[in-house]
Image (spheres, rainbow, N blue to C red):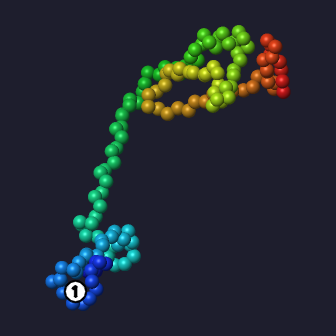
Amino acid sequence: MLRQHPSAPSSPESADGDDQSFHALPKRKTFDSVRNPIGNADENIAPKSEHVTPPPPAVRPVCFFLPDKYEREPIEVALMDQEIWQKYALLTNEMTILVTGRELFSKLKFKVTGLVPYALYRMSVHLKRACKYHFKYTGNKYVETK
C-alpha cells in the first residue's frame, strides 16, 4: 500500500506517477504483528528481513569438578590484630561506636582456615551485652549510666 507524502499535491492529475511533485512512500513497517498474537498465522509472522537477530547464546559458567574427598583440616577462626585486642583487654576492652557510619572501633577481623574450596558457608558474630548498664568515661574513670 502506498501513501502520499504530506508535501505532495493531492490533485488527481499528479497521481499518475509521471509528475515529479508526487512522492510515493511505502507504508511504514512495524513489528506489531510479531508482538500481537491475535489474527491469522500469516499476519503474525514478519518477513525474514524484518526479524531481529537473536542474541548470542549465553555463556555457560565453567564447572569445576572437585574431588569428593579433601584432606579435612579442622576449621579454625583466629582473631586478627590480637596484640591490639590484648592491650584493650587490660583496659576493660572498650569498644567505641563512631558516629560516622556507626563503625565499630576497633574492627573485628578474622582469619578462617580449613574450609573446603568452592563450598558455601554462613558465618555470623553474636554480640551480647555483659551488663544492663552503659559506661561513660567522665573524670578519668568510667561511670555506670542507664
Given residues 121 and 1, the one toward you in this image is 1
Q: Residue at x 42, y 27 (%)?
A: 69
Quadrant of the image containing the N terminus: bottom left
Q: Is residue 80 left or right of residue 12?
A: right
The answer to which quarter of the image holds residue 104 is top right
Position of residue 85 measured from the top left corner of the image (x, y, whole percent): 64, 14
Above or below, 38 against 140 in this view is below
Amino acid at circle 1: Ala
> Is residue 91 in view from this perspective?
yes
For residue 82, side relative to residue 97 (left or right): left
* Residue depicted at 68% across the width and 13% down the height: 88
Residue at image x 50%, y 20%?
113
Q: Position of residue 127 (x, y in %)?
A: 69, 27
* Residue 107 location, quadrant: top right
Label 1, secondary structure: give it: helix
- The reply to whether residue 45 is in sight is no
Would you name the residue on which mark 1 appears? 15
Residue at left 31%, top 54%?
A: 55
Name which quarter of the figure residue 21 lies in.
bottom left
